[in-house]
Amino acid sequence: MNAVKMTLIATILALILVTVTASADDVYISGFLQGLYGGGLHDDNPVPSDLTASETRLQMKLESYRGSAEFFGRLDFYYDGYNESEYDWELREGYIKFRMGAFDFKIGRQVLTWGTGDLIFINDNFAKDYQSFFIGRDDQYLKAPQDALRAAWYSPLGALDVVWTPKFTPNRVPTGLRLSYYNPLVGDIVGGEQFYMEGREPETEFKNSELSARLKRYFGTADIALYFYKGFYKNPEGMDMATMEAYYPELFVYGASMRMPIFEGIFWVEGGYSDSRDDPDGDITTIPNSEIAGLAGFERQVANNLTANIQYQAIYMVDYDKFEENVGGQTEVDEVYHLLTSRITQLLRMETVVLSGFVFYSPSQEDVYFRFSADYKYNDALTLTLGGNIFDGTEKWTDFGTFMKNDNLYFKATYGF
């Protein structure tokens, strides 16, 4: 975006904010200004810049409540100079929320999430931004926004949420421009414009819209939910061999979860069946097979201001025999994928210092991802953060091994208002 357009948009936004603020007492404005700077730790990473982040971000948040209706907006302006400098903006959220009869509606651009896992998603098929997640942006940026209509209905059977997304919204994954990735056609980790990777999205038609549903109810202290999703894989996991394009195969997901307090902590369990609609028999090697995934986790405070959790996930590939037969038995992919995770959070100095570490380790793929951060709250407005992301694996094609050249450290200063 050029500077003239950026100035015009900023001016219009400022006029709107001034007008709205002057005409209403029930409007609340807040936000933050943030500088994020990070660099890679590998000289041989094939990306255009050694920097992983060099950006200044201004987020404006506006809330308004009138009667039974609510408006919420969150708008980001940022200067991104990690490679070729550019100004840009993004409407992170902008929705209206209101009640009509027995239904609550939330319409507009919004960030959506559900499920029980800590950074593991089985039934949460809403869009994620893994590129932001891997370079040190705030955790709120892991959840990418999408334009949707959400309706909630409360009954004696439980709370039913239905989300309709007219246009498919994929995950934001590393494309090779800022973070490198493993390319199976090349057989190596690649990056740069010549290896820019962007999946082919389904055509914008009504039949290609996404539909998510959740029925949730408490039984005693147990929070139990059922889920359904109709849409597409959120990552470009299919390959069209005619055009040699990656694309998003059709996907249905059916699942359930439970979360409850136990042993002075919180226990959760979740499962789901991912139905690969473009490969129902599991005999097409360029489309993911259907899978059954399960997750269990437990979290509790183990000492004063020290909280820890642990999770185990298993994913069983349906029709594994056909998959193995179709690749001629030449595969290192296991029938069952195992993943262990743990998060540890320590609060110090009157909770002005927060130390956090999160590790993913897969014994079946023998790869690991470790993210850590130290936050220092200098005063009520200013927070300073130092953090990093470390990837490793014995193979380049695995979930975390594919990013093994993207190890990075970052520094972040945030002023809230």
Image (cartoon, grey):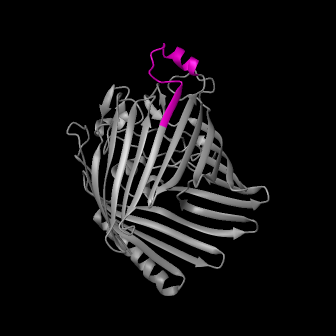
Note whether 311 is above or below 260 in the view shown. Answer: above
Residue 331: say if magenta: yes
Percent across and percent down for residue 63 are 52, 74
Q: Along the line of sight, which residue is nearer the eye, 114 or 117?
A: 117
Using the rendered image of the protein, determine whether residue 133 is visible from the camera's viewpoint.
Answer: yes
Q: Along the line of sight, which residue is nearer the eye, 293 or 79?
A: 293
Percent across and percent down for residue 2 are 30, 61
Percent across and percent down for residue 215 are 70, 52
Work out which quarter of the rendered image holds the N terminus and state it.
bottom left
Q: Which residue is the extreme one toward the right?
A: 156
Name the residue: 32% across, 39% down: 180
Residue 212: say if magenta: no
Note whether 125 is above or below 322 in the view shown. Answer: below
Percent across and percent down for residue 93 are 50, 63
Q: Give the range drawn in magenta.
A: 320-339
Name the residue: 50% across, 68% down: 73
Q: Along the line of sight, which residue is nearer the eye, 302 or 69?
A: 302
Decide if residue 336 is on the left or right side of residue 37: right
Using the rendered image of the protein, determine whether residue 53 is visible from the camera's viewpoint.
Answer: no
Note whether 337 is above or below 4 in the view shown. Answer: above
